[in-house]
Image (cartoon, rainbow, N blue to C red):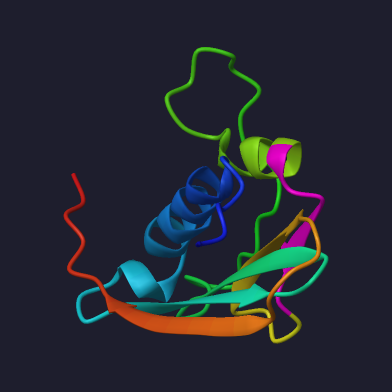
Amino acid sequence: MGIEPPGNLGLILSELATNAVHHTRSGLPEGRFAVRLLVRSDRLRLEVRDGGPLGNVHPLRRSTSDPLAEHGRGLVLVDSFAARWGRLPNGHGMYAEVDRRPGLVTEISGVVSTTPSRP
């Protein structure tokens, strides 16, 4: 019998990975980002390591207050569904943690290469 992941884990991963592609060097040609999922007895920790900032910008807040804006709500969603989240200590990525019931401890890692299509 497998362990059912929390329902919003996919959404959190999608938001953090999208931010890596749109706001860091990971979105450049030949860019990459890595995803790591740590499964602990009390929580799941999702990490998205990116290629570093574009320029000297490290935004963690929405840049627009326009409620009809197409973008700018990803971290608001992450904040809503994750118990804890923030920037990785090395400054090249983000993490989010979701609480869970006791269970298996394991680690799953992967590296994703991107070929972004930007408008």
Depth check: give the residue in front, 70 or 11: 11
Identify the residue shown where x is 68% and y is 76%: 104
Is the C terminus in the top left, top right, bottom left or bottom right quadrant?
Answer: top left
Quick check: is 98 in the magenta stretch? no
Task: Say left or right for 47 vs 84.
Answer: left
Against 31, is 64 above or below? above
Magenta region: 81-88
Depth check: give the residue in front, 91 or 97: 97
Against 79, is 19 above or below? below
Task: Say left or right for 110 vs 36.
Answer: left
Task: Say left or right for 7 vs 101.
Answer: left
On the image, which quarter does residue 38 sit in? bottom right
Task: Say left or right for 33 vs 103.
Answer: left
Against 25, is 72 above or below? above
- Residue 37 visible, this orientation: yes
Q: Going by the picture, which residue comes out furthest to the top?
A: 68
User: How far across and down, in percent of the image, does residue 68 sit?
Assistant: 50, 12
User: How far across and down, in percent of the image, does residue 6 sit?
Assistant: 61, 47
Depth check: give the residue in front, 5 or 65: 5
Q: How many marks?
A: 0
Identify the residue shown where x is 32% and y is 67%: 27
- Residue 62 visible, this orientation: no
Identify the residue shown where x is 77% and y is 64%: 43
User: How far across and down, in percent of the image, does residue 47 sit?
Assistant: 60, 72
Depth check: give the residue in front, 40 or 109: 40
On the image, which quarter does residue 98 sit in? bottom right
Identify the residue shown where x is 55% and y is 35%: 72
